[in-house]
Image (cartoon, grey):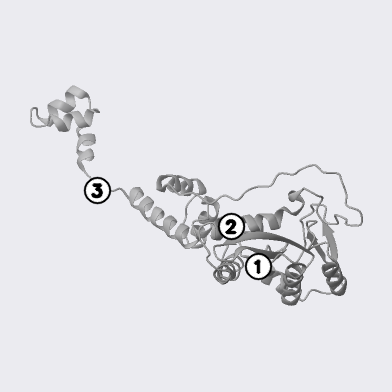
Amino acid sequence: MDKLEFINSNRFKYDIKTMCTILNVPRSTYYKSLDKTKSQRELENDKLKSDIRRIYKANKGIYGAPRIHHILVTEGFNVSLKRVQRRMTELGICAITVKKYRPHSNKKVTEGLKNVLKRDFTTTSINEKWVGDITYIHTVKDSWCYLASVLDLYSKKIIGYAFSKKMTNELVVKALKKAYSSQNPDRNKKLIFHSDLGSQYTSKDLKELCNEFNIVQSFSKKGCPYDNACIESFHSSIKKEEIYGNTYYTFKEANISIFRYIEGWYNKKRLHSSINYMTPNQYELLARLAV
């Protein structure tokens, strides 16, 4: 029991002045302890926590303090990142973390399938370097289904994707065709398309399509996911932010969910720290306007 609690518990036995004198507590401090009115700072923190909770829920519960702080600042709040972090701790909320891939050493090179990208993920504009991969998505009725995605390394935008019940050559061909159609890249400029060594990406079908589109193919080393870390990161994000929280009974349900995530959320609304807290659509638009 602290001094003020002791005084409160004994205030009927002794007068306040005497008790404060005995315990060496200023009477102003005692009377202040009786005032339950919240201070201006406490009111500000309550408002801040309310807005943090609003932003957190509006963004699928995936944003951490840096992104929430960025949104608050754009909304006109004068608040530090550390203060946002403290309020989030008090609320017991945190960002969904995405698995980070660590590099693995594998010097074996598959003959004729070169790693042109060589983990150089830097770009100066859109349609310079694209990356692609396939991931698995489970449904109750239709079992495992497959999502092939194509991402532009400059904008972080998913520029093409295809979803199928079968993991065939046509799946990756369809995804790349969609990417090419939506982006309409300059055929006179070098465009690299990087993927792993999966049979769909090393197939004759995809090789012929890349030749038709004047695209240079690049391949990760065998057993080295870090060579294609950016698209691996996207697939990790869609699983943690969308797929793992839902149960899909049919292929159609999963397909609708994937469409909503990519077109309605990831490309349109999801902020990326690597592109100055813009969305992929915003960053791509700036690139197009700069041409």
Disc 3 marks a residue whose amino acid type is: Thr
Left or right, 114 with respect to 125, comes to right
- The local secondary structure at tag 3 comes to loop
Q: Nearer the viewer, residue 219 or 14?
A: 219
Q: Residue 62 location in percent, x, y? A: 52, 55
The image quadrant where one finds the N terminus is: top left
Residue 26 seen in the figure: no
- Report, in whole angstroms, how far the alpha carbon at label 2 lies from the one at label 1: 18 Å
Mark 1 Cα shell of 10 Å, populated few (<14), some (14-19), many (≥20): some
Whichever of callouts 1 and 3 sits on the residue coming sooner in the sequence is: 3
Q: Residue 151 location in percent, x, y? A: 71, 64
Whichever of callouts 3 and 2 sits on the residue coming sooner in the sequence is: 3
Q: Which residue is mark 2?
A: 239
Single out the mark in the foreground, 1 or 3.
1
- Location of residue 200 (image quadrant): bottom right
Q: Which mark is residue 21?
A: none
Q: Which residue is mark 1?
A: 165
Q: Residue 220 location in percent, x, y? A: 80, 53
Disc 1 marks a residue whose amino acid type is: Lys
- Location of residue 258 (image quadrant): bottom right
- Location of residue 271 (image quadrant): bottom right
Q: Which residue is mark 3?
A: 37
Whichever of callouts 2 and 1 sits on the residue coming sooner in the sequence is: 1
Disc 2 marks a residue whose amino acid type is: Lys
